Image (cartoon, grey):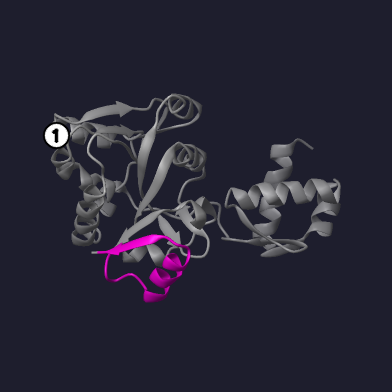
Amino acid sequence: MLSEKRRSTLLRHVRSNGSVSVEDLAELLNVSVSTVRRDLDDMDERGLLRRVHGGALAVDGSPAPAETSMPERAVHNLEEKRRIAAKAVELITPGGTILLTGGSTTAQMVPHLSAVPGITVVTNSIAIAYEIGTATGDVQVLVLGGLMRNAELSLLGHLTTQALTDIHIDQAFFSAYGLDPGYGMLGAHLAEAETDRNMIATARRLVVLADHSKFSRRSAIRIAPVSSVDTVITDHGAPEEAVTALRAHDITVFQV
């Protein structure tokens, strides 16, 4: 059985049962225990399941969570997103290079960017690039190429990753789909996850923008572990225990 087909079968079995042992998976797939362990370790790293001693647990029962459209997200918790975005811009170093991914919160950063002199914005979002070009013409924009996901006007895939090779990014700003203080930043689309991880890997610092609603969301897709996050900007409605847990990981948390 080819590795991708095997892993797809493995993941379906974990999700349908909730939990499964290494031995059962080895028997089901007719492969060695060591092969199953390698598959589980890799899929845990990708956020598709949670590795435990002797087996694995399902992170979510569905392949991907439902996500509202961009226009719907743009007006949800709008005031909180505006405050979070304004604070995010305060963290940008003049003359620096930042990465902005598409999202309803990162979009709120655009009107403030011209206040920071000499910056370059790298983005895989056609929508973000257009907004910067029309609203803040003095900000230099570098658009990453790739396959366009029409619903979000975002670019992803091998070409996007390849374009990052020679780019030095000081700070990456991500609008999180969800944020689990014990697990990491969560995504809604498996197709985007690998591109997001590669973008994070090129940045010196990761800043996550997440209003209080993001802390109650769950997903099988982990974009980045907690250890990769440097700063979280949220609002005063964020759960106190979540803020405490993030700070326990030495993450700087701003509540605005």
Instruction: Judge whether 63 appears above or below 93 on screen.
Output: below
Going by the image, does 199 lie left or right of 124? right
- Examine the image and state in which quarter residue 118 appears: top left
Span of residues in magenta: 235-255
Is 244 inside the magenta-drawn segment? Answer: yes
The local crowd at label 1, few if under 14, some if 14 to 19, many if 20 or more residues have their Cα within 10 Å, is some
The quarter of the picture where the C terminus appears is bottom left
Residue at coordinates 44% horizontally, 53% vertically from top-left?
229
Identify the residue under disc 1. Answer: 136
Residue at coordinates 32% horizontally, 66% vertically from top-left?
212
Q: How far from the left and from the top, in percent, is residue 82?
A: 19, 55
- In this view, which residue lies farthest toward the bottom? 240
Near-viewer residue (152 or 185): 185
Is 190 inside the magenta-drawn segment? Answer: no
- Examine the image and state in which quarter residue 215 appears: bottom left
Residue at coordinates 52% horizontally, 44% vertically from top-left?
190
Q: How far from the left and from the top, in percent, is residue 112?
A: 16, 44
Near-viewer residue (82 or 253): 253
Secondary structure at badge 1 equals: loop
Going by the image, does 98 lie left or right of 137? right
Residue at coordinates 49% horizontally, 43% vertically from top-left?
193
Q: Say which amino acid is labelled 1.
A: Thr
Instruction: Judge whether 231 appears above or below 8 on screen.
Output: below
Q: How far from the left and from the top, in percent, is residue 169?
A: 37, 35
Going by the image, does 113 lie left or right of 142? left
The quarter of the picture where the N terminus appears is top right
Q: Is residue 248 visible?
A: yes
- Examine the image and state in which quarter residue 58 appears: bottom right
Q: How far from the left and from the top, in percent, is residue 93?
A: 26, 42
Q: Is residue 151 visible?
A: no
